[in-house]
Image (tube, rainbow, N blue to C red):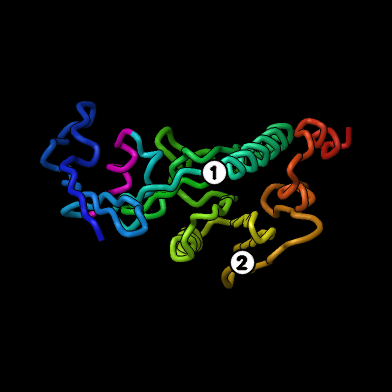
Amino acid sequence: MSQTTIEGRAGGPTPSRAGRSRASQPKLTATLSIEERRMLVSDRPITFEQWVDRGGRELYELVNGSMVEMMAAQLEHERLCVWLLTLLNVFVGERGLGEVLGSRTAVRITEFGGRLPDIVFVRAGRDDIMRQRGIYAEPDLVVEIRSPGDRPSDLTALEAEYRTLGVHEIWFIDPKNRHVRVLSRRDEGYEEQVISTGALSSEVVPDFTIDIQWLWDDKRPEVFGLIQQMMGR
């Protein structure tokens, strides 16, 4: 393991917040592992509020009080993400079902944890959990699109955090293996389905159903044409 130390502060002083000083911010060091993923750790855990205070938080997620660098997304990941985000956003907007946000929206997991899902949906009537700095309770739907560089341990930790938070529905889209794991919250825990063919539907977004094959197609259906069909126009 090679190690590099970077002197810095998590967030720095924020003049608009009374009583906050530079001394109250954790001192960060960066460790570069053999997997070449940078972690910013400190002399004490970084809080969610300190994380969202930092400029450039889009490069890191907050895991157990340390900032973990996110890997750069590949082109196909971004194409799929944009297509699905656009389709879901237009559908939700047409129905007045709530709000759809993208991968730079911070979701508070714990006091010392925060994630940046690829796609997140919060249903109408739950606006109180959304603030300028992020989402402060469990979203109704979280979508994560797997990338080739994702490590199984990272995905397991991510799923554990979403389950602990109580996200109502979670989609893990796996383009390489061409399936989607759908986790649906129940009173007794989470029900899991692995879908590889046929229809992919959401419980929390009423009537939102797509053909799963569209996720893998090189040329996906045009969004507004699909919306017309889904709305019965």
Q: Which residue is mark 2?
A: 186
Q: Which residue is mark 1?
A: 74
Left or right: 40, with 98 as reference point? left
Q: List the single residue furthest toward the top.
A: 16
Callout 1: SS:
loop
**Disc nearest the viewer among 1 and 2:** 1
Q: Compared with residue 197, is residue 26 higher up or lower down, i.e. above or below?
A: above
Q: Compared with residue 52, is residue 154 higher up or lower down, i.e. above or below?
A: below
**In the picture, residue 126 is in which quadrant?**
top right
**In the picture, residue 199 is in which quadrant?**
bottom right
Residue shown at 54% from the left, 43% from the top = 74
Label 1 vs 2, first from the N-terminus: 1
Q: In what quadrant of the picture does the C terminus appear? A: top right
The circle on residue 46 is: none
Q: In what quadrant of the picture does the N terminus appear? A: bottom left
The three-letter code of the residue at mark 2 reads Arg
Q: List the single residue furthest toward the right.
A: 233
Q: Is residue 49 shown in magenta?
A: yes
Q: Is residue 164 visible?
A: no
